[in-house]
Amino acid sequence: MNSAMRPYFGRSSRLAVALGLLALSGLAARPALAEERAKDLFGAEKLPAAAAAQSIGFYSKGCFAGGVAIPMDGPTWEVMRPSRNRRWGHPAMIAVIEKLSRDAAADGWPGLLIGDISQPRGGPMLTGHASHQIGLDADIWLTPMPSRPLSIAQRESMSATLMVDEKTHLVKDALWKPQHTALLKRAASYPEVERILVNPGIKKKLCDTVKGDRTWLRKIRPFWGHDYHFHMRIGCQPGSPNCKAQEATPADDGCGKPLAWWFTEEPWRPNKNPDAPKARDVMTMANLPKECRAVLDAPGPASAEAATYRGGAIPVAVAEPDVPSLPATAASGTAGLPGTLNAFTSTPEVGVPVPRPRPPAH
Ligand SMILES: [Zn+2]
């Protein structure tokens, strides 16, 4: 942290003073202890780590710096469940959501209701989601944006539409519209988007009805839940040497045997051990890449507004050459964890673009 950055990162000077006082008083300022639960630490962060954008670790075991928020409202979107403060993502993720909202509107979808993206600095969440930890995942409701603006209270309480019959695991035909298919096709069309998670019933509906170009079905992946929303995941972005990519999806449309498995009893058997802790509940700082400590310790911007994406140009956190980068070291090992297969839950959030102030040049 150099002095030139203090006008922008006002918190850093206060932090420096606080650390100095701690040293004088004989109390050592300590980094997060290895055994502390990561979700408590990351769940308490209100603002992103002000640094060049970087995803660290894996979708279900990591964190990120340089996050930006999508504005609460845009011409073609609204952020849902705003109190969760999960409208943060890697700038590339936010840009994709904003683009999807515009393209989808042109396709005839009235606008996006945006669910959870990530916490300001990512990491495991206090509730819901195994993934969404590195700023590259976003949930979008399968309910179109209503014509009248939603109040904050409505965004907290409004229910999404359940698209799938819970007994048959098939899409409710009365609810599924060609616009749903068009929305998923549009999302899958972006090169950044590597996979889209949907309920198996939705995948089956697409397999049964999509005519013509079916190559995009490769990215549509069946998974538990995802019957109120779909989950859009983009790949690791440039500038993130410690971001761990997910294995590529198979080249075929995924409508054959792997999909048939979802319509057997096996995936739906009751959990034999429902009280077993989920990975996110027991994950400690020692389980996360060690760079995530620096992400926790990094200063934040002056306000959420200062880190809100306004479209167009690359957000400041990426573009500023004098913003410090976190050290790029080899990905660190992580201790064993319980399986992280299943913790997605339905949820929502998002926003739009304005240039952020540059720090004064020195
Ligand atoms: Zn999700």
Image (spheres, rainbow, N blue to C red):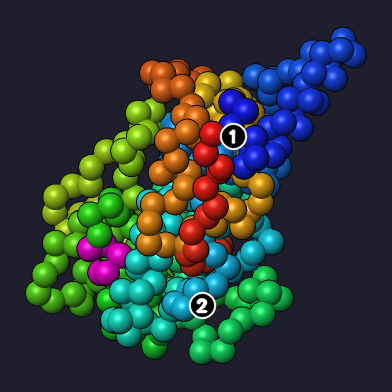
Residue 177 seen in this snapshot: yes
Give the percent coordinates (x, y) of residue 222: 34, 57
Residue 275: quarter of image? top right
Q: Is residue 111 above or below residue 56?
A: below
**Closer-to-camera residue (305/179):** 305
Q: Is residue 27 magenta?
A: no
In magenta stretch: residue 186:
yes
Query: What distance separates the C-alpha of mark 1 from that of mark 2?
Result: 46 Å
Question: What mark, if any, has residue 5 been given in the picture?
Answer: 1
User: What residue do we see at 32% from left, 85% from top?
Assistant: 108
Labels 1, 2: front one: 1
Q: Return the residue found at the far left.
A: 212
Give left or right: position of 75 versus 177. right
Q: Main secondary structure of the magenta part?
A: helix
Residue at position x 41%, y 83% from top?
Answer: 110
Image quadrant containing the C terminus: top right
**Disc 1 residue type (three-letter):** Met
Q: Amino acid at mark 2?
A: Thr
Q: Is mark 2 within 8 Å of ligand 1?
A: no
Quadrant of residue 297 within the rendered picture = top right
What residue did someone put label 2 on? 161
| Residue appearing at x 46%, y 29% in the figure | 325
